[in-house]
Amino acid sequence: MTEQLLQQVVNGLLIGFMYALIAIGLTLIWGVMNIVNFAHGDFLMVGMFASFWLYTLYGLDPIFSIPVCTALLFVMGVLIYRFVVSKVMSGPMLAQLVVTFGVSIFISNLAVYLWTPDFRLISNPLLSGTWVIGEIQLSIPKTVASMGSVITSLFVFLFLKKTKTGKAILATEMDREAALLMGINTERINSFSFGMGAALVGIAGAFLSTYYYIYPQVGGVFGTIAFCVVALGGFGSIEGAFIAGILVGLVQTLGGFFFDPAYKYAIVFMIYLITVWIRPQGLLGW
Amino acid sequence: MRKLTLKQICGGIIAFIAVGIFPLLTTNTFAQHVVILFFMFGMMGVAWNIMGGYAGMFSFGQVAFFGIGAYTSSFLLITYHVTPWIGLIVGGLVAALVGAAIGYPCSNLRGHYFAIASIAFGEIVRTHFNNWKLIGAAEGLSLPMLNEGFKNFMFHSSKLPYYYIMLTFLIISLGICYLISTSKIGYYLRAIKESHDVAKVLGINVVRYRLIAIMTSAFLTAMAGTFYAQYVLYIDPESVMLLPISIQIVLISMLGGAGSVMGPVVGAAILIPISEVTRVWLGHKGTGVDMLIYGFLITLISVYQPKGVWGLFTNMGKRAK
């Protein structure tokens, strides 16, 4: 019983770190430009497919395709910001909410059109197998992905706190007008943040492709969970998203363990609703 | 109360006669089906509008109310042989109660937070229905074939009765929405939409009026759900509980113009035929082309016509004067 429980905690942490990385990209976009990117899960799907095709066509292992996925998603994010999202920034809030739904439906169905709705899996990646420590089983790809996600999150954190661009992003997040008055080109910060948010999810996609099924609708679940993680952690808070991601991973696996696995996502959403009831601004929001 | 102008009354009468005799002119059942769906989504758009357009609560979880309405009446019919007309009312009440139960804790949530909470709510309800053995879980419910007639809310030989019933429902919802928009409640809701805090300071009981809006909206949406169950005679969580239906409802209202009584009807009149026709033409191969176009359309509308088409009409009217 205790071994099983411990195993569930480990599994929760492993998936939680992935949620954290996905949510950090989302919270960056949300915090900087007050846009909820409903296409975030579909960006993840694009990252996974990119990694899949690089492996299938060119034999490039997912671990080495991370830079390619990151660059690809960055460019995609910037383009989508330039041509779609920036046009609704001054429009009504409803349009801001709906526009990324449109992008989401478009991207996921483009994937269906190009690659059919089939489920795929990368066969024999470099990372495979499991470590067994005592009674606990650690899947190697999952562990590496989680460590990669923690390192990436740390880099994002340092980037925002230490570099000039990072500080400009944080300033824009706090007060757009004041940032503009300080000579920060907020329009460029917007498109950079959108690209960066997408690039982070590209990294997550490459990692996930080592052990997760790849199919056009894969973004749905991850995307919805990511919204809850972000709102749970608090509006635009990187640290909040990281903690909430781990929390959601644990809630999901332990909830599935103690109640019914079919309800694991419903439990996550319940926890989310209860949290915003008590603390509408989220755990670390202000 | 704002008086209707002669022009508006004439326009209304002409439109009413046109939709009234339309199905008698065509025997094409697909055309009738598209118009029935247009009425149904128009009704749900009107219901969404009471919450979203007037009170500023952008709900992306309307499909939960739709599903609750469909399931309640079907369950009562199959298990207790209760006529769907009573099921309709019971379903509406259940949806309103569920709406209140979820709306009360969410009464401090605004903007994006409310939208995401509503998605979470819809997903919880769907997961639960997908696993609830009593109501058929993922297999769904098949309604028994009963004798055709108004009492059983079932018509096999023709779509006409469904057409007129749905038209009546739509007119009832428009009436309710019109009453709300011109009454004190409508002004309170608009005040809440503009600013929660100011509304509160002015002495408006924000929680109460938000709940009124949610419950009305839930009731009407559940009515459409019961209608849908009686119309297709088979429901499962995949067909009446999926997020895209909620998005469709929001989109219709936005395209038509959120916050105006007729807006969602106009939006449904434009969007439903487009999405049905592309689905029938392009959707059968499962290549996703129909949804691809749909996604592109959503993006276009949000970028170029975010305030809705209804605004164009009224602006033209003002300029003409």
Image (cartoon, coloured by chain):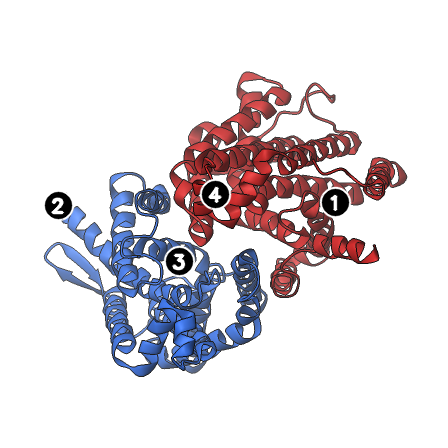
Give me the chain letter of mark 2. Answer: A
Q: What is the CA distance from the residue labelled 2 to the residue labelled 1? A: 58 Å
Q: Which residue is mark 4?
A: B199
Q: Secondary structure at mark 3?
A: helix
Residue at 24%, 68% (x, y): give it.
A150
Q: Of residues B132 and A165, which is closer to you in this image?
A: A165
**Where residue A106 appears, x then y in whole percent?**
57, 64
Give me the chain letter of mark 3. Answer: A
Q: What is the CA distance from the residue labelled 4 to the residue labelled 1? A: 41 Å
Q: Which residue is mark 2?
A: A2
Q: What is the CA distance from the residue labelled 3 to the residue labelled 2? A: 29 Å
- Display colour for chain A: blue
Q: Earlier in the sequence, mark 4 or mark 1?
A: 1
Q: Amino acid at mark 3?
A: Phe
Q: Secondary structure at mark 4?
A: helix
Mark drawn on residue A222: 3
Mark 4, mark 1: which one is toward the viewer?
A: 4
Q: Amino acid at mark 1?
A: Val
Residue at 33%, 45% (x, y): give it.
A264
Give me the chain letter of mark 4. Answer: B
Q: Earlier in the sequence, mark 3 or mark 2?
A: 2
Q: Is residue A190 above or below residue A222?
A: below
Q: Amino acid at mark 2?
A: Thr
Q: Of residues B247 and A184, which is closer to you in this image?
A: A184
Q: Which residue is mark 1?
A: B34
